[in-house]
């Protein structure tokens, strides 16, 4: 009768191989901090799934006129490929908001390129993030169907773009939508694009989750793994000698 081997299969043999040790270390470190790649059209689902969020609602900014200038806050900046951008301090202040509105407080960003296709809105973050979401108002109600709202990150799972919201043929004026995404790979920029013509929309309540810094326990785990690999290599070298 054979005697069962008391050692686990992964640790079998006289010594843990360097390749297996590296695989174990990588798996342990990867398990510490990972967001599943996911898009959201529900603010409640996004808030429940993503911890540690910060939020920008533009309340500290003064109103501005529509133009090519970027909108900049300590957390992020917004720019457009087709002007213009403006900070609204009310639905029609300092200019007509074209049925856009704030979803938090009274300030928000108006995006409007008159009598042309809407172009691309680029949001650049002051620090790498792993999740991002916002509330839009009056998006997709132009005479020409806007089609699909698409988000593209500058790295990671959504670097080639992802369709997040399929806008109806006829959208109600002033309608609001939540749009968001999360991914494991931190990113510093996201672009929003959609079809349509003479399209005006509002952006407010931009949420972001800053990419986590490894906790002391994670650093300790990595250090212990590296020390173990170094010891393993010395033992194998001395045995061969």
Image (cartoon, rainbow, N blue to C red):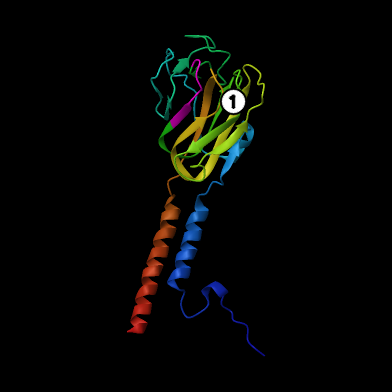
Q: Quadrant of the C terminus?
A: bottom left
- 210 left or right, relative to 237: right
| Residue at the outermost bottom position | 1
Q: Is residue 54 visible?
A: no
The residue carrying pointer 1 sits among few (fewer than 14), some (14 to 19) or many (20 or more) residues within 10 Å by Cα, namely many
For the image, the number of numbered tags is 1
Q: Nearer the viewer, residue 187 or 166?
A: 166
Residue 177, by quadrant, is top right
Q: Which of 203/59 is in front?
A: 203
* Residue 5: image location, x then y, percent: 59, 81
Relative image position of residue 160 (x, y in whole percent): 50, 42
Q: Quadrant of residue 222?
A: bottom left
**Among all residues in the image, which is located at the extreme left?**
241
State which quarter of the image contains the N terminus.
bottom right
Image spot of residue 15 (x, y percent): 46, 77
On whether residue 115 falls in the magenta region, the answer is yes
The residue segment tinted magenta is: 114-123
Mark 1 — residue?
Answer: 146
Q: Is residue 204 above or below residue 40?
A: above
State the predominant SS element of the stretch in magenta: loop
35 in relation to 219, above or below: above
Q: Residue at x 59, y 35 (%)?
A: 164
Residue 149 in view, yes or no: yes
> Does the magenta run of residues contain 118?
yes
Residue 46: x %, y % from top left: 59, 36
Considering the numbered disc 1 on the image, is that residue within a helix, a strand or a loop? loop
């Amino acid at each position: 009768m054979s005697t069962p081997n008391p050692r686990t299969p992964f640790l079998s043999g006289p010594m843990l191989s360097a390749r297996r040790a590296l695989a174990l270390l990588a798996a342990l470190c990867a398990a510490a901090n990972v967001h599943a790649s996911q898009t959201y059209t529900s603010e409640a689902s996004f808030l429940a799934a993503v911890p540690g969020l910060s939020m920008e609602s533009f309340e500290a900014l003064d109103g501005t006129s529509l133009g090519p200038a970027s909108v900049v806050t300590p957390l992020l900046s917004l720019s457009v490929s087709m002007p213009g951008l403006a900070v609204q301090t009310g639905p029609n202040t300092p200019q007509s908001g074209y049925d856009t509105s704030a979803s938090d407080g009274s300030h928000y960003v108006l995006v409007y390129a008159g009598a042309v296709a809407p172009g691309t809105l680029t949001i650049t973050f002051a620090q790498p993030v792993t999740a991002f979401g916002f509330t839009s108002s009056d998006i997709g109600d132009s005479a020409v169907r806007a089609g699909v709202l698409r988000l593209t990150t500058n790295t990671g799972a959504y670097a080639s773009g992802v369709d997040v919201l399929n806008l109806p043929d006829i959208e109600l004026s002033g309608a609001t939508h939540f749009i968001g995404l999360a991914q494991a790979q931190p990113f510093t920029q996201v672009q929003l694009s959609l079809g349509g013509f003479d399209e005006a929309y509002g952006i407010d309540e931009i949420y972001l989750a800053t990419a986590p810094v490894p906790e002391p326990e994670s650093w300790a785990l990595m250090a212990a793994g590296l020390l173990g690999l170094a010891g393993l290599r010395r033992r194998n070298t001395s045995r061969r000698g």
